[in-house]
Amino acid sequence: MKTTTLPLKHSINRSYCPLALLLISLAFACFALSPQARAVCQEGCFTNQNTALGEDALLNNIEDNNTAVGFNALAYNTTGTFDTGIGASALSNNTSGVDNTGVGFNVLEFNTTGGGNTAIGSQALGLNTFGNSNTASGSEALGANTTGDTNTATGLDTLLNSTTGNGNTATGFNALSNNTTGNNNIALGAQAGTNLTTGSSNIDIGNGGVAGESRTIRIGKPGLQTATYIAAISGATVPTGVAVIIDTTGHLGTTTSSARFKEAINQMDKASEAILALKPVTFHYKHELDPEGIPQFGLVAEDVEKVSPDLVARDKEGKPYTVRYDAVNAMLLNEFLKAHRKVETLEAKLAKLEATVERVSAQLEVSKATTQTVLNNQ
């Protein structure tokens, strides 16, 4: 049997690389495990899961799970937990507030015990002290809020001057910027609800609102929008509903017939006779209004105005716009009832005449029979 011996030189060459790599790995491992070789924390190393980076960040903290990045961030925090302040003076005066998040210069700067607040943007929620569960995104959003709760502001200067208002929602530049103590307002769009101050429960979408009003919905700006389309209305049957009307300011509502809302109630009497001079017409709307040219039936407002101005509804310029057909219907009913009463009177008279005729006829028959008897006896 032949034995082959490989040269030692070749064997060493083949095993050199793996061996070297193994030795290097072991050396790095030992170096890493060595106490002297561990990374040195230059700044912000705390126990209890706290992180701080910046001069005086988390300076007085004694609690856990806080993060402060920036000069004076969470500087006076003592017992607050789960707070995050990123930016110079972010949450700097927070003492015991929990679950707050502030990102930006001076955000939540004066917050002390308020909890659950989120502020993103320079000075957002900057004056908040005890307010809870507020969300501000945008420079100076909710900047003046002090004790208000559950507000949401998104956009530059949104809810800027709100101090103690609760439950407000503003989205868009300057939205609800002048609200101070109003509650539960909703504003959507640039400068939406900007005229509101102390009113509550308003909804303004693309509309500035009106100072002092409450429980009002305003959508769109007069003169800017010229058409409205709302789904799920056309074709929907509402068997117990009432008609909705609109005035020249865009105010929607319904009419009421309850005596609780009326005064100076009088019988219509001859007031309804004006409709007898009205001239019903057939017509088509102009092509730009109705391309299909559907036949229409009604009255001409200008003609009605000549007969009874009270039956005409006018536009914002005071010109005749349409006819108050609901009032026309009531007047028609009154004229019908008047005619019906006349018919009843005539029918009563006719009945009396018929009775008289029957009585006279009966008497004539008796007279006729008597006369015949006399003649027969002669």
Image (cartoon, grey):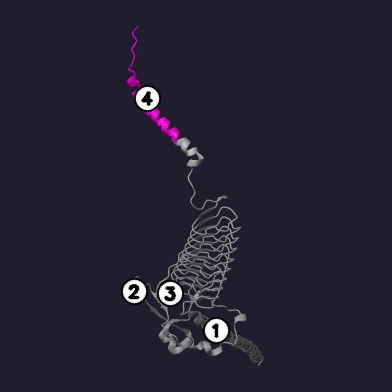
Residue placed under numbered mark 2 in the picture: 288
Q: Is residue 205 magenta?
A: no
Q: How far is the residue under mark 1 from the one under mark 4? A: 117 Å
**Quick one: 161 or 335, which is closer to the camera?**
161
Residue extending furthest toward the top: 1
Amino acid on which the number 1 mark rests in the picture? Asn
Up the image or down, 186 lies above or below 46; here it is: below
Numbered circle sitting on residue 221: 3
CA–CA distance in space, label 2 to label 1: 38 Å
In magenta, the rendered stretch is 1-27
Helix, strand or loop for disc 1: helix
Q: Give the residue type that dot 4 points to.
A: Ser
Q: Residue at x 60, y 79 (%)?
A: 258
As drawn, the label of residue 15 is 4
What secondary structure is marked by label 3? loop
The type of residue carrying mark 3 is Lys
Query: Mark 3 to mark 4: distance in Å?
Result: 84 Å
Q: Residue 16 at x, y = what percent?
A: 36, 26
Does the magenta-highlighted stretch encompass residue 8? Answer: yes
Give neighbour class at mark 3: few <14, some 14-19, many 20+ (Cα, 10 Å): some
Q: Nearer the viewer, residue 258 or 139?
A: 139
Which numbered disc flags the more N-terminal residue, 3 or 4?
4
